[in-house]
Image (tube, grey):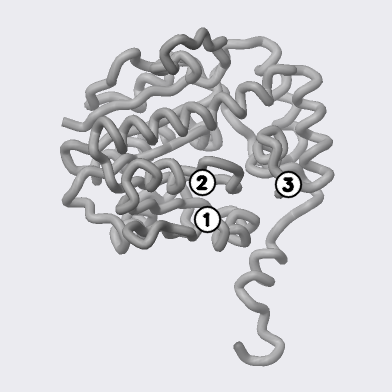
Amino acid sequence: MPEGHPTPDQEALSKIDTTVPHSARIWNYWMGGKDNYEVDRIAGDAYREIAPNIETMARASRVYLIRTVTFVARECGIRQFLDIGTGLPTYDNTHQVAQKVAPESRIVYVDNDPLVLRHAQALLTSTPEGVTDYVDADLHDPEAILEHAGKILDFDKPVALMLMGILGHVQDYEEAKDIVRRLQAALPPGSYFVHYDSTDTDAELKRAQDGYDDTGAVPYVLRSPRQLTAYYEGLELLDPGIVSCPLWRPEPGTSPEPTDVYGGVAYKP
């Protein structure tokens, strides 16, 4: 690196705005992580004052990720995962869950956040048999995502496409549906779509989200469970369908409480 030129890590750090709260960092805070700033903790606490269940929702979303990734790896034999909207690493990330089931699994994470980029090295761990990689790309450009992911994943073989809590950041509903369709179109038969998003099913959550959106952070649109069903069109939705995440195939003998995060798993015939 020539003298005076910033390193990639320094460039990433220079792009991090610590004056405005950021959804990935706030989510990290609610999950008990340490990769957040005071502005994020203030916004997270304000959100929680209005919607006290938000931390429960955040942690339930991670449990859902663990269950769904385990399911498609163990029960469906999937060995390739495209996880778009990675967020900051906390615990039981996709590659850790998938490679615990099948060490040869290949995982590509996608995000375009500079703080996530800074922590990419923490994500880029893998079993010797498998691969874990990170793509710096924007959800609004599915073709660029697929082009980069295709260097790691074999799109002639089944892939699990994961859009976990990210589509609410696409403000226009029609655009969100179009992005999903373009990504799903690249999947070969036998692939799976794994998804969740927060919904508009609770008045407190809607009020808290309105306050968050006014902070200058990237807004997040709460949509109805019925709107979420459009993301699964043309696929075979697995039982129990699109449900509150804790109710998606819960562990036997448990009685989980539903939250306002809904998701489902679907198969591409």
State which tag comes first along the sequence, 2 or 1: 2
Helix, strand or loop status at disc 3: loop
Numbered disc in front, either 2 or 3? 3
Residue corresponding to mark 3: 34
Q: Residue at x 80, y 38 (%)?
A: 41
Residue corresponding to mark 2: 86
* Residues at discs 1 and 3 in contact (Cβ within 8 Å): no
Locate the C terminus by quadrant. top left
* Residues at discs 2 and 1 in contact (Cβ within 8 Å): yes
- Gap between marks 2 and 1, in whole Å? 10 Å
> Which quadrant of the figure has residue 215?
top right
- Gap between marks 1 and 3, in whole Å? 15 Å
Q: Is residue 169 left or right of residue 229?
A: right
Q: Position of residue 134 (x, y in %)?
A: 46, 58
> Which quadrant of the figure has residue 77?
top left
Numbered disc in front, either 2 or 1? 1
